[in-house]
Image (cartoon, rainbow, N blue to C red):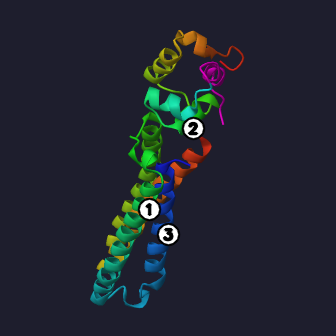
């Protein structure tokens, strides 16, 4: 499977946000728990809207949640 | 496993069982005669009813067990997976239609043509569901 050219810190941010579960984050963002899991594992590239919603949930700018991977990009 | 993925598994198993029975039990010896059409009609009725009943019971049972998941709307990943599945299902559909067109010129009987079209639809559906399940298991295409 082709690796996505960016990584994310969602798992860490969830932990820092009081160990928020994937289901809770999914509910806030408007996607399923499985979609959050797929994004975290780098298996699914979210739309810009969902990416912004995730960042806003944690109160962070987009680039602090998602980072471009120079090696694979 | 998400609610939608479970529904896809139920659909896959139900379709394989129902249409597997249909194509194995069909009296191919009379397919060229007018009676072949009525045999199809007579067999498609229980197949359709069985699929509807199985899907209704399975969906209701899973919705009762996990009501929160059943209420969830389809999200963007679900939609992407569905579009990709439908895209791949198009290929067997096109091949099946062309085979059916050639069958017309070979004077295939109406029952043979009907079964060819039916097989085309079943194959396309199995492809669609199979691809969607594969993508659900894999996470997504990347």
Give the secondary structure at mark 3. helix
Instruction: Report if residue B47 lies within the magenta region.
Output: no
- The residue under label 1 is B61
Q: Nearer the viewer, residue A19 or A60?
A: A19
Parent chain of label 1: B
Query: What percent of the width, then of the height, locates residue B52?
Result: 35, 68
Depicted A35 relative to depicted B19: above or below: above
Q: CA distance from mark 3 to mark 1?
A: 21 Å
Q: Is residue B93 left or right of residue A24?
A: left
Query: What percent of the width, then of the height, locates residue A33?
Result: 53, 37
Dot 1 or dot 2, earlier in sequence: 1
Q: Residue furthest front?
A: A18
Parent chain of label 3: B
**What residue lies at 53% left-to-right and 9% top-to-bottom?**
A61
- The residue under label 2 is B141
Depicted B92 relative to depicted A69: above or below: below
Which segment is the magenta one? A1-18
Q: Is residue B142 visible?
A: no
- The residue under label 3 is B16
Give the secondary structure at mark 1. helix
Instruction: Report if residue A9 lies within the magenta region.
Output: yes
Give the secondary structure at mark 2. loop
Query: What percent of the width, then of the height, locates residue A62?
Result: 53, 12
Depicted B63 relative to depicted A23: above or below: below
For discs 3 and 1, the disc positioned in front in the rendered view: 1
For discs 1 and 2, the disc positioned in front in the rendered view: 1
């Amino acid at each position: 499977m082709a690796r996505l050219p960016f990584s994310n810190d969602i798992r860490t941010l969830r932990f820092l946000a009081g160990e928020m579960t994937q289901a809770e984050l999914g509910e806030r963002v408007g996607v399923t728990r499985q979609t959050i899991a797929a994004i975290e594992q780098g298996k699914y590239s979210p739309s810009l809207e969902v990416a912004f919603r995730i960042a806003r949930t944690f109160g962070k700018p987009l680039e602090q949640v998602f980072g471009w991977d120079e090696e694979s990009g | 496993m998400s609610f939608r993925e479970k529904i896809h598994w139920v659909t896959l198993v139900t379709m394989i069982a129902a249409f597997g029975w249909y194509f194995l039990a069909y009296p191919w010896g009379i397919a060229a005669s007018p009676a072949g059409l009525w045999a199809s009609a007579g067999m498609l009725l229980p197949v359709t009813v069985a699929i509807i009943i199985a899907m209704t019971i399975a969906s209701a049972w899973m919705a009762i067990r996990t009501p929160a998941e059943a209420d969830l709307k389809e999200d963007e990943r679900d939609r992407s997976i569905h579009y990709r599945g439908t895209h791949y299902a198009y290929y067997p559909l096109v091949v099946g239609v062309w085979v059916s067109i050639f069958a017309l010129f070979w004077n295939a009987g109406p029952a043979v043509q009907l079964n060819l079209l039916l097989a085309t639809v079943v194959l396309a559906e199995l492809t669609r569901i199979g691809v969607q399940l594969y993508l659900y298991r894999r996470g997504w295409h990347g």
